[in-house]
Image: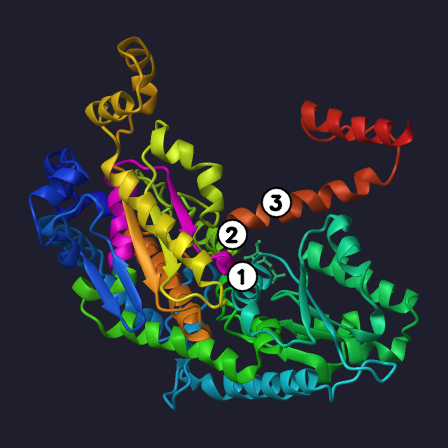
Amino acid sequence: MLPTIDPTTTKSWKKLSNYFTSIGKQSLNQLFESDNNRAQKFSLQWQNLFVDYSKTHIDEQTMRLLIELARECHLAEAIEQMFRGEKINQTQKRAVLHFALRNLGDDPVFLDGRDVMPEIRTVRNQMKIFSTQVRNGDWKGYTGKPIRNIVNIGIGGSDLGPAMVCRGLQFYGHERLRVFFVSNVDGGHIYETLRHLNAEETLFLIVSKSFTTQETLANAKTARQWFINQGGKAEDISKHFVAISTNTPAAMEFGIDPENIFHFWDYVGGRFSLWSAVGLSIALQIGYESYEELLKGAEAMDHHFRETPFENNLPILLALLSIWYTNFFDCATEAILPYDQYLERFPAYLQQTIMESNGKSIDRSGLPVSYKTSPVIWGEPGTNGQHSFYQLIHQGTQMIPCIFMAAAKPLTPLSEHHQLLLSNFFAQPEALMKGKTAEEVRAEMLSKGFNEEEINKLLPFRVFRGNIPSISLLYQQLTPYNLGAITALFEHRTFVQGIIWNIFSFDQWGVELGKSLANNIIPELAHDDPIQTHDGSTRQLIHKVKQMRKS
Ligand code: F6P
């Protein structure tokens, strides 16, 4: 296993801290003025992706030192450990093999000396047969009609990944099929989803790695009851319910026909599972061949990540830039801003991937870390965000590094819309970097006929300090292949950051706590007797709910 290294004790970290005091003071405008070739130097083309990271506070020396940091933290060994199937998820004693799910070649992937590829290929084949039957109408509901509605019931990784991809690739969807996602235990979610559907044409995918998750089981039970209430019989359930899980016995106990269970394995983390049968909704929506394109894009990114020198390695470069801003500039958040409405759910998906992985404060030797780990990840598609929170990015008190994303070619024939969208995609990072000086504001106001008094009064509000960093990620078009590659890029970026921060990225103990606490309260809500447990505030809130329900 990797030696545990506090990154702040490395030589490169110290050099970076010293270097930060000089380069950190230079504005992005100055960096561009001092180097005509900057944009070309700090950008990278890989297949259909182009990443421009020149609008960040770096120079060649910064990049050299950040790469030295990655080396000192044994990143190369860590990457090999993952791809060799070592149990790098040490707190759960598990290997991390989501890359095997998109290994479409003949190479074996070993776990404890056993090749896992045959079992992966078997499930892929099961997905292919099933999705083809549903799409071509051979899979019939209990009244003999083909399926029209697919309802994915799952939460966290059993929801966010497939939901993001299904939304992202809806352009390629089957014209008869509509895909819905129900995750929240709030009854409003399933109620509003089901109320316009009819049972005879609806297929439920119950997706849960553990098949013990409270929210998913509650929604699955409600769906089953709804199906019966709508006229389905117990013996019809096998035509309308399938499960995707590592826990086959629990899925069977729920009443899922063993033939309808798509298996996956402990070596796939929930938030990295969209490449497994958890992505069945994707295969149903876009067809198995296109689903394999998604896997192919991710597989290509895996090769890039494993085989490319650090200097030209996209996930590593993006990870190091994020560390530069988090740990040296002390930035607390990062904004993900896709100028692509199809990627509406991408920021939410990345929140889980990044924050559930790297929102940790205990290092790999079990000691508290003395430095920041994951920033808060947030965002919305552009241009919507511009009319909402961009004010804070432009003129607020914090520096927020941004990742802008856009397709060079639109999917729709509405090319004029795309020109407008792209003009904003170019304008915002430029404005964030350049800002607007007092002199510029003054000249502009004079030209608009403002008098001196008005100018002096209003000028401070109209100045933009600029110097806000961003990375621009361009992809040729939003295809399954490109989305697969982009998604895997961010997965690997997350892994790299976890290695450098010396934390375990593949467990999620913080989430487990919430699950058990809520379970303790369920019985207390079922009666009217005063309760003595909890703190005063929680007790008061529980009593208040009971009172309010009565009135
Ligand atoms: O939210 C915590 C979590 O454990 C996630 O990691 C996981 O994706 C989600 O719950 C759902 O778990 P399951 O797929 O087992 O229902």
Q: Is mark 2 within 8 Å of ligand 1?
A: no
Q: Secondary structure at mark 3?
A: helix
Q: Is residue 458 above or below residue 24?
A: above
State which quarter of the image contains the N terminus. Answer: bottom left
The amino acid beneath tag 1 is: Met
Q: Can residue 15 be seen by looking at this rendering?
A: no
The amino acid beneath tag 2 is: Ala
CA neighbours of label 3 inside 10 A, class few (<14), some (14 to 19), many (20+): few
Q: Secondary structure at mark 2?
A: helix
Q: What segment is highlighted magenta in the picture?
A: 317-343
Q: Which residue is mark 2?
A: 348
The image quarter in which residue 251 lies: bottom right
Q: CA distance from mark 1 to mark 2?
A: 8 Å
Q: Which residue is mark 3?
A: 514
- Identify which residue is drawn at 27% across, 44% down: 430
Asked whether 82 or 444 is in front, the reply is 444
Where's ligand 1: which quadrant? bottom right
| Comparing labels 3 and 1, the label whose residue is closer to the camera | 1
In the rendered view, does 177 fall on the left or right side of 42?
A: right
Asked if the residue at tag 2 contacts the one at tag 1, i.e. Cβ–Cβ closer than 8 Å, the answer is: yes
